[in-house]
Amino acid sequence: MILEESIQQDSPAWQMCVKVSFGLAAFAMGLGITFLPADLWVKGYLAMGYVFSLAASFSLAKTVRDAHEANKLLHKVSEAKTQKILREYAPE
């Protein structure tokens, strides 16, 4: 078939590993900021910077993924058009 959909999914073990490592990293960073020997405003600044960095990382990952998915779709459409032209002009 021309436009066969091949869906690649991560294993449940990998998904759990990613979620647990994210949670541990966020918890450790929060703990580090909390017990940092600094004034409250410094801790607040670091916490805001950390939250902003997390949000920017998620946005970047989503943008890269969306661009990759759009590129895959364009290649599939182009391949389907090529297959159609070949079928019309070069019958088997």
Image (cartoon, rainbow, N blue to C red):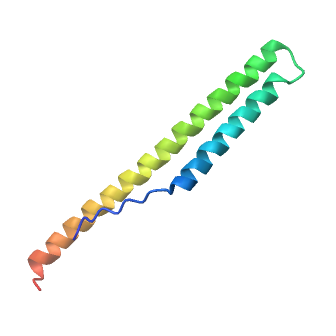
Work out whether residue 13 or residue 43 is closer to the camera in this orientation and state it: 13
Task: Write the residue at 71% across / 33% down.
Answer: 27
Residue 54 x %, y %? 62, 34
Quadrant in which residue 30 is drawn: top right
Q: Quadrant of residue 44?
A: top right
Q: Position of residue 5 (x, y in %)?
A: 30, 62
Q: Would you say 55 lies left or right of 26 here?
A: left
Q: Position of residue 90 (x, y in %)?
A: 12, 82
Q: Is residue 11 above or below residue 16?
A: below
On screen, residue 44 above or below 21: above
Q: Residue at x 54, y 50 (%)?
A: 15
Query: Which residue reaches farthest top?
Result: 40
Residue under the image location 69 percent in, 26 percent down: 49
**Quadrant, the N terminus:** bottom left
Instruction: Using the image as rendered, state which of residue 77 and residue 19 is in the foreground.
Output: 19
The residue that appears at 71% across and 39% down in the rendered structure is: 25
- Whether residue 92 is situated above or below residue 1 in the rendered picture: below
**How many numbered marks are there?**
0
Q: Is residue 9 above or below residue 80?
A: above
Looking at the image, which residue sits at the far bottom?
92
Residue 76: % across, % down = 29, 62
Dividing the image into 4 quarters, which one contains the C terminus? bottom left
Nearest the eye: 58 or 34: 34
